[in-house]
Image: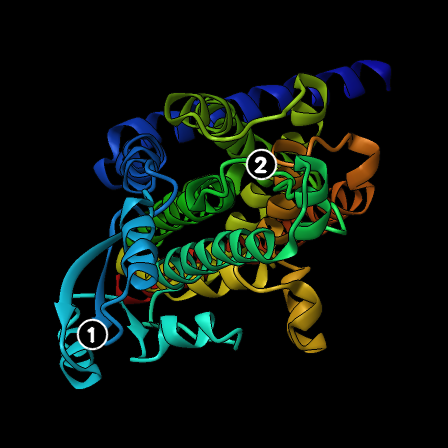
Amino acid sequence: MKETLLHRIREGIKDMCYIWAKEMRQSFTDEGVLIFFILVPILYPLLYSWAYSNEVVREVPVAVVDLSHSHQSRQFIRQFDASPETKVAYFCTSLEEARALVGRQVVHGVLYFPTDFQTRTMRMEQTQVGVYCDMSLMLTYKAIYQTATSIASNMNSKIQIALSGNFTDREDEITTQPLAFEEVPLFNPTGGYGSFLIPCVLILIIQQTLLLGIGLTAGTAHDTKKHQSLAPISRHHNGIFRIVLGKSLAYFMIYAVISAYLVLVVPKIFGFTSLLSGGSLLALMLPYILSCIFFGMMLSCLVRHRENVLLLVVFSSIPFLFMAGISWPQSNIPGVWRSIAMLIPSTSGVQGFVRLNTMGATLADIKVEYQALWILTLVYFLATCVVYRFQIISARRRAIEDEREKTTDE
């Protein structure tokens, strides 16, 4: 009995290595799989990161309508133009003219100074500056509005000091800022869009390229009926596990290297925020890669042709990004969609990675996401085994029917 057990173990390892070698060979000989497993994960993050390497928008063009023509309005305009975020591109004589420029997207905002802008100030009355922003792009809106607000606050402080009659700098400080505060941008010191978005995209790339590569492999196997060659390996009850483990081991070895490149090298190249520790990163990425692999292998049963996987991944990429809770808070996502999102490995993977990478969290701080990934790994592993067993049984039945038809014809 002991010899039989040892024999079955050796046989299982041999079969698993056979499947691993076959899958590795196909991954590097199939051009489509090679593109999605190697080239896309290497080149796409570089292109995406390069597009957002500036982090924040600079020199946003703005039109100015100055009906005041006063010293105070010109001072405001000079400070606004000197800001690195904005640029005074046009001077207009009316709001209608400035509105036409916004409509043509020549400028992204308008500064409007009424005729009594300085006169009201001199009369000790409250005056106004009109700030009109193009809301179609939030980054330009933020640059224009925050710059105008900052300049207005600075000018208000100077007017308060001039009218206060103080004798010391400390009195001026208390007059302009009775409640002291300090603005500290947590987790994103530069306030950059790239540091906010790129970590999420990198994690999603791992999942989506795995789905593409595994789906292409399944489509090729279905078209050429290569999966029938795996049926003899599953002659024992645990033969399915050998196939699943052999395939997943090949994918894991490839993506262990790809993932290290994505989460360590790419942020370093472009200087994005990274507070990762080696132990926590390894602990998170292990279940994430495994859950993505088994998730892709399970979904491969839906692929009947190589082209189908492209439609599946293209359709799912944007919803997966939104459901991850980065571009829109998870608390504001309907409960049904939040439940569906928890079934996708990228949801817990993105949330856990962002907290480790950007917020400096520890593994204990992402316990929920970490446990969710291991649960998904187990569930999708068992589901993959069920799907593969069904496929092999179906392949055997078709093979038997084909043999009967040949015998009948003869």
Q: Position of residue 299 (x, y in %)?
A: 51, 57
Report the mark closest to the observer, 2 or 1: 1
The amino acid on which the numbered mark 2 sits, given as a three-letter code, is Ile
Left or right of 252? Residue 35 is: left
Q: For the N terminus, which image quadrant? A: top right
Q: Position of residue 407 (x, y in %)?
A: 34, 60
Q: Residue at x 56, y 27 (%)?
A: 274
| Frontmost residue, 213 versus 45 | 45
Q: Position of residue 137 (x, y in %)?
A: 34, 65
Mark 2 or mark 1: which comes first in sequence?
1
| Frontmost residue, 233 versus 49 | 49
Q: Residue at x 61, y 42 (%)?
A: 185
Provide the residue designation for mark 1.
102
Q: For the C terminus, which image quadrant? A: bottom left
For residue 12, the mark is: none
| Frontmost residue, 178 versus 315 | 178
